[in-house]
């Protein structure tokens, strides 16, 4: 039991790091016109993995396969990622902030940046180099000073990011997903375990809508978030009415509302919370502040 819980702790620790680093990296290497699509693709992959895991574990359970086999399968994607990561180029924007001109050129060439993006980042390099000259190397106090100045300049962006992520977490999605069979049973479904894979399909469908609509001129981040927020509220209202007065809302309507809530949340909140956070926070403190926002909102 101790080894199992230690493994789960280490797995959660790794996921916590990836939760911040991956969207930050994708945000900094993606073209501005497709940044939302690229960041939401990360969430789409998470939903695809969630769906695949549901189907694999369900099939294993029906065939009485030991649960350790499922845990071993979960180790395969991280192992493949570990083998590929050394070949990924460093973020050119991060290199620009650090003032690394040689590394920036190499990374920009590997990623195929446009000349306009290269010119903008070159200006960032020149600014960083000129700022470092009188100040010296970046130590702890210099880092704290950078955060303090960024807070004074970008405090509104921080509050907007924190508010968006806070309401995303407070929507109840994590409880709805984790206790899906129990919620469906309360909605009147007799055999909720059979319907649990549909949760994965709803997540994947919602993430696909976010991928397609986040950078589309007819939708975009704001309209997609507002429309899906309305959908989430209506679905939760139907579920609440069924739980308080079962005769007012049928079993089918409340169950459908549950699955649609999963769909709307992933379309309007799931991946877009990373897009909003990564685009609003300033480059020099993006990863640090994003980590703090996700940690506090998660708690």
Image (cartoon, grey):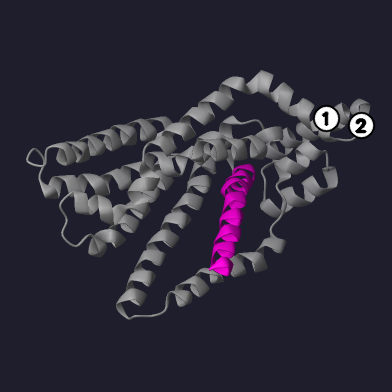
Magenta region, residue range:
1-30
Q: Quadrant of residue 225?
A: top left
Main secondary structure type of the part rendered in magenta: helix
Mark 1 or mark 2, whichever is nearer to me: 1
The answer for how far apart the CA atoms under marks 1 and 2 are is: 9 Å
Q: Which residue is mark 1?
A: 142
In the image, 124 versus 63, the foreground residue is 63
Q: Which residue occupies 21% across, 44% down?
A: 257
Whether residue 2 appears in magenta in the rendering, the answer is: yes
Q: Which residue is mark 2?
A: 136
Q: Which residue occupies 22% across, 59% down?
A: 192
- Percent across and percent down for residue 274 are 52, 40
Q: Residue furthest left?
A: 247
Q: Is residue 63 left or right of residue 294?
A: left
- Percent across and percent down for residue 24 are 62, 44
Which label number is shown at residue 1? none
Label 2 secondary element? loop
Q: Where is 224 relative to 108, above or below?
A: above
């Amino acid at each position: 039991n101790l080894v199992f819980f230690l493994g789960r702790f280490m797995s959660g620790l790794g996921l916590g790091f990836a939760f911040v680093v991956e969207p930050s990296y994708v945000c900094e290497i993606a073209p501005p016109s497709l940044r939302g699509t690229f960041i939401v693709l990360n969430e789409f992959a998470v939903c695809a993995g969630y769906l695949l895991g549901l189907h694999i574990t369900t099939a294993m359970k029906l065939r009485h396969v030991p649960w350790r086999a499922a845990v071993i399968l979960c180790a395969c994607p991280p192992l493949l990622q570990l083998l590929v990561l050394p070949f990924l180029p460093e973020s050119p924007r991060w290199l620009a902030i650090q003032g690394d001109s040689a590394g920036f050129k190499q990374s920009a060439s590997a990623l195929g940046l446009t000349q306009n993006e290269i010119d903008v980042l070159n200006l960032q390099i020149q600014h960083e180099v000129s700022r470092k000259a009188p100040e010296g190397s970046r130590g702890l106090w210099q880092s704290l000073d950078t955060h303090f100045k960024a807070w004074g300049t970008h405090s509104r962006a921080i509050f907007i990011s924190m508010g968006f992520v806070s309401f995303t977490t407070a929507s109840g999605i994590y409880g709805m997903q984790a206790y899906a069979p129990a919620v469906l049973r309360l909605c009147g479904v007799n055999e909720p375990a059979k319907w649990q894979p549909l949760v994965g399909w709803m997540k994947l469908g919602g993430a696909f809508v976010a991928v397609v609509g986040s950078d589309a001129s007819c939708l975009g981040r704001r309209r997609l978030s507002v429309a899906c927020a309305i959908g989430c509220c209506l679905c939760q209202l139907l579920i609440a009415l069924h739980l308080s007065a079962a005769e007012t809302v049928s079993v089918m309507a409340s169950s459908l509302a549950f699955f649609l809530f999963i769909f709307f949340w992933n379309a309007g909140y799931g991946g877009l919370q990373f897009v909003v956070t990564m685009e609003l926070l300033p480059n020099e403190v993006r990863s640090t502040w994003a980590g703090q926002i996700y940690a506090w909102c998660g708690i």
